[in-house]
Image (tube, rainbow, N blue to C red):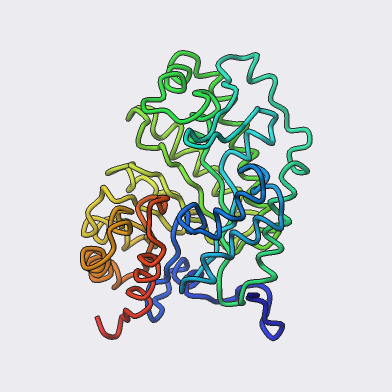
Amino acid sequence: MSFNDPTKKRFVISSRLIDTLKRKLVDRPPIWLMRQAGRYLPEYRAERQKAGSFLDLCYTPDFAVEVTLQPLRRFALDAAIIFSDILVIPHALGQEVGFVEGTGPVLTPIRDEAGLDALSRDGFSSHLQPVYDALKGVRRELPADTALIGFAGAPWTIATYMIEGGSSRDYPNAKGWAISAPDSFNRLIGLLEDTIAHHLITQINAGAQAVQIFDSWAGALPAPLFARYSLDPIGRIAARVKQAAPDVPIIVFPRLAGPRYRDFLTLDAVDAIGVDQSIEAAWIRDEIQPHKTVQGNLDPAYLVQGGAAMEAAARDLLGTLGGGPYIFNLGHGVVPQTPPENVGYLCDIVTGWSREKK
């Protein structure tokens, strides 16, 4: 099945998602889901097996295009997000990165100046060219009114993987480096700022009409370090991207930031703030939504359970946030045990909701 329609323009001028990101109130909130392409879909699992490895899935444009489009063939979604991973950045810088089934990402950890010195920008863009080729391929296939989102991780979140060597509960090595040797840690953050900004701008040049910066572990930062390693680096990246592409909206997702979500209102280059499920929707409505578009907040657990509980939670969110610029999404990504039919039902709820009927 192809989404290609030669009568439509290739690039989005107006869509529910783009209009909402620009704080326009359209007929209903747009919907897309973090990890909407993933292991919960049997067709994804089939492609993953054919690809051979997760990184081959990311770096082979035909595979990446296919898995990006799969959820849009099934569900009434308003946007595609390119299938890739935040760890392509350290991989492109020369760090060894792998993905182990049942474990997740495994990296050769960087713990000192020698490891930092071994990173190189040489070949960075060519290493990531398959990602940009996949973006071009997806854009060719999408209807003109379906937005295409590019993304990258934020410096702090990527740094935690680079330093810990994978996922972590408490990030002792990353925090320890930031506290004990801030000068060298700032070198790493600066390198990531530069390469992340470059990656996002190149994704835009390849066809992305909006970009999201994921700071998935922002909430792990100690309060005195939050601005230095989450807010400020994201602000500098967003400013560079906005300077290069003034009309392209930028979403930030500083997960588990708590009351510090308000701090991101100070970033003029940021158009929307994604919010996790730990925050009350009424607080988001009162504190964030008057100033920027908001996104997310539904706990992925509701999507796993489905049925009346999911419908009630979704309608509560629509009732609380649907009066302003709001993008329906989750508070984190779709989890592998999610029944696909629940995703379809959620899309039906959102697409059947109307501001006029509220």
Name the residue rendered at 67%, 81% in the picture: 5
Nearer-the-camera pick, 22 or 101: 101
Establish if 190 lies above or below 268: above
Q: Position of residue 249 (x, y in %)?
A: 53, 61
Name the residue rendered at 47%, 54% in the picture: 35
Residue 146: image quadrant is bottom right
Residue 54: image quadrant is top right
Nearer-the-camera pick, 352 or 240: 352
| Total marks in image | 0
Q: Could one spot residue 109 in this view of the protein?
A: yes
Image quadrant holding the C terminus, namely bottom left
Q: Position of residue 132 (x, y in %)?
A: 71, 54
Name the residue rendered at 49%, 71% in the picture: 74
Establish if 227 lies above or below 57: above
Q: Where is residue 76 in the image (x, y as percent from the top left)?
A: 46, 74
Image quadrant holding the N terminus, namely bottom right
Q: Horizontally, is 313 left or right of 175 in the view?
A: left
Q: Position of residue 346 (x, y in %)?
A: 35, 69
Nearer-the-camera pick, 284 or 58: 58
Q: Could one spot residue 295 in this view of the protein?
A: no
Establish if 75 lies above or below 352: above
Name the residue rendered at 28%, 43% in the picture: 258
